[in-house]
Each structure stands twice: as structure tokens, then as C-alpha cells.
Image: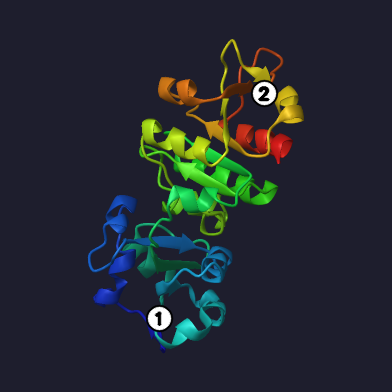
């Protein structure tokens, strides 16, 4: 499909980029599961390599040729729009600093059982509502080498634009899905042989180093919000509580930093 030079914004195919909230993108009309947006050539490359299906690309002039090259066979059917930075910002509501914004079909999420089947180390993110922290946790999971991520119903969506950006696109590479309530999720974890380890500041928590030395073959690491931490339900369903010892009057690390420390010790 030829590159579309924009001088105005009436083309209906531009609707994917038209100042939608992440929630609106998730419920986009005419799609089975919604859509999501990625920024930068690097993240677009990771999305395409992981098999995600592109719908349209919005590109600064300097990134058009690379965008087309990345699209490969998709370039025949996926429009690449380009225009002046001010016009693209008028459409999206933000400056396209990273050269490219692309819209892609949101895939159906796999079942928890399918992700647990061949896994040894998984991460469960409970109710972390900051997309930046969610994205950073995914980046740690990808870089250090855990097998999958599970998010609870109230957790920020990993497909939110900020989560994707902070994760450097690793949300698109790491297998993940949502868990149901703890009453339903805990039996699934245990039936597949996982010990549930809650990262928490409780009186009975053991030091991470000590736990890592005797950790079982399969561990599900639970991470909670920075303020309240893990919910009482999550703590009650955990098999063990684990903490990272702190010094100089600091009680804990940022949840994303804590995830990296804990994963490095356990993987």
C-alpha cells in the first residue's frame, strides 16, 4: 500500500490514533478484542516479531522507509501515514517523539493453565495501577528470564501505551494473562505445582537470600502495590512470605526494583 502524505485528518483510517484513551482502545468498535498502540521502531519490530497484527502506522518522514521495511509482507495492506509533526500531534494529542506510532490488533489472552504448564518461575502482579511500574516489571521479567506474568483484575493493563513504552516492548514478548479472584487463582497455581511466595513486609517473612537457597522447582512470586502492599487475600493464599532486607531506615524498594532483585535471586 502506498505511503499516505497527510495534509488534513479526515481519513477514517486515522481513527486508531485520534486521541483515544487506553480504555477506549481496548473496546474499539469493529475489532474482536480491541487495539493497542506502540511507539518507536524498536517496539514495533518486537510486536511484529512476536506475531502481532498491525492495522496502521503513523510515521514522521524520517522513519517512513524503516517502517515499511519492518512491515515486510504487511506493507501491501497496512497504510503508512506521514505528515508534519504538528499535524500528527494534532491527531494524537502528543508529540510523536519516537518517530513512529502503530496500531495493532489486541490478541485474545491465553488461559492461566496454558502458561503455567511449562513454567518454572512466574510473576503475579496484584493491583499495581501505575502503568509505568507494570511496564518496568515486564522489562525485568524479560531481561532476567522468568517464564510468564499474571495480572489481577484491578491491575493496570500491560497493553496501555505507557506500559508498553516503559517495558521497551517486552509486554509483547513475555507470555501473560489475567487471573481471576484469589479463591479461583490459588488452586490453579497449586494444582500445577507452584509454591506461592509473597514479597511482603510481614513478621513471618524470611529473607530473600535464605528463601532462594531452598526455593522449590516452581515458584510464583507475588508483587503488590507500593502503598498498601499485597491484599490480605493474597497474603492468606501465599505459602511463604519473603522480604528483601533493607538498611538506613528504608523499609522497601519500588515494586519494579523489588521485582528485579527478587527475580535475579530466584531465577
Distance (Cα) linking label 1 and label 2: 48 Å
Quadrant (top left/top right/bottom left/bottom right) for the N terminus: bottom left
User: On the rendered structure, is 161 left or right of 165?
Assistant: left
Residue 244's disc number? 2
Q: Dot 1, crowdedness within 10 Å: few (<14), some or many (≥20)? A: some
* Residue 265, position as x, y percentages in the image: 73, 35
* Residue 87 in the image: above or below residue 142: below
Label 1 vs 2, first from the N-terminus: 1
Are dots 1 and 2 in contact, CB under 8 Å?
no
Q: Which quadrant of the view contains residue 33?
A: bottom left
* Residue 31, position as x, y percentages in the image: 28, 67
* Residue 162, position as x, y percentages in the image: 46, 50
Q: Which quadrant of the view contains residue 161?
A: bottom left
Q: Residue at x 58, y 30 (%)?
A: 254
Reading the image, the residue beneath label 1 is 78
Closer to viewer: mark 1 or mark 2: 2
Q: Dot 2, crowdedness within 10 Å: few (<14), some or many (≥20)? A: some
User: On the rendered structure, is 178 left or right of 201?
Assistant: left
Q: Residue at x 40, y 31 (%)?
A: 182
**Is residue 156 something that shows in the picture?**
yes
Q: Which is nearer the eye, 54 or 195?
A: 195
Quadrant (top left/top right/bottom left/bottom right) for the C terminus: top right
Secondary structure, mark 1, is: loop
* Residue 74, position as x, y percentages in the image: 46, 82
Q: Which is nearer the eye, 130 or 241?
A: 241
* Residue 91 in the image: above or below residue 246: below
Colour mode of the rendering:
rainbow
Amino acid at each position: 500500500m502506498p505511503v499516505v502524505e497527510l495534509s488534513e485528518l479526515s481519513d477514517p483510517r486515522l481513527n486508531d490514533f485520534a486521541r483515544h484513551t487506553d480504555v477506549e482502545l481496548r473496546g474499539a468498535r469493529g475489532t474482536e478484542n480491541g487495539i493497542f498502540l506502540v511507539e518507536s521502531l524498536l517496539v514495533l519490530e518486537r510486536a511484529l516479531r512476536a506475531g502481532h497484527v498491525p492495522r496502521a502506522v503513523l510515521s514522521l518522514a524520517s522513519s517512513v522507509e524503516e517502517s515499511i521495511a519492518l512491515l515486510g509482507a504487511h506493507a501491501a495492506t497496512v497504510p503508512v501515514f506521514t505528515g508534519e509533526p504538528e499535524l500528527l500531534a494534532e491527531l494524537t494529542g502528543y508529540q510523536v517523539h519516537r518517530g513512529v506510532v502503530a496500531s495493532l490488533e489486541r490478541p485474545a489472552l491465553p488461559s492461566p493453565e496454558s502458561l503455567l504448564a511449562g513454567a518454572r518461575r512466574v510473576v503475579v502482579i496484584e493491583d499495581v495501577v501505575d502503568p509505568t511500574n507494570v511496564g518496568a516489571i515486564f522489562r525485568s521479567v524479560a531481561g532476567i528470564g522468568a517464564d510468564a506474568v499474571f495480572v489481577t483484575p484491578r491491575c493496570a493493563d500491560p497493553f496501555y501505551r505507557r506500559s508498553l513504552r516503559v517495558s521497551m516492548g517486552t509486554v509483547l514478548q513475555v507470555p501473560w494473562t489475567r487471573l481471576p479472584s484469589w479463591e479461583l487463582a490459588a488452586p490453579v497455581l497449586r494444582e500445577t505445582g507452584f509454591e506461592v511466595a509473597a514479597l511482603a513486609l510481614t513478621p513471618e517473612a524470611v529473607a530473600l537470600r535464605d528463601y532462594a537457597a531452598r526455593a522449590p522447582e516452581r515458584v510464583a512470586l507475588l508483587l503488590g502495590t507500593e502503598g498498601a502492599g499485597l491484599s490480605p487475600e493474597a497474603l492468606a493464599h501465599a505459602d511463604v512470605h519473603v522480604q528483601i532486607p533493607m538498611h538506613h531506615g528504608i523499609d522497601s524498594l519500588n515494586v519494579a526494583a523489588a521485582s528485579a532483585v527478587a527475580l535475579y535471586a530466584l531465577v
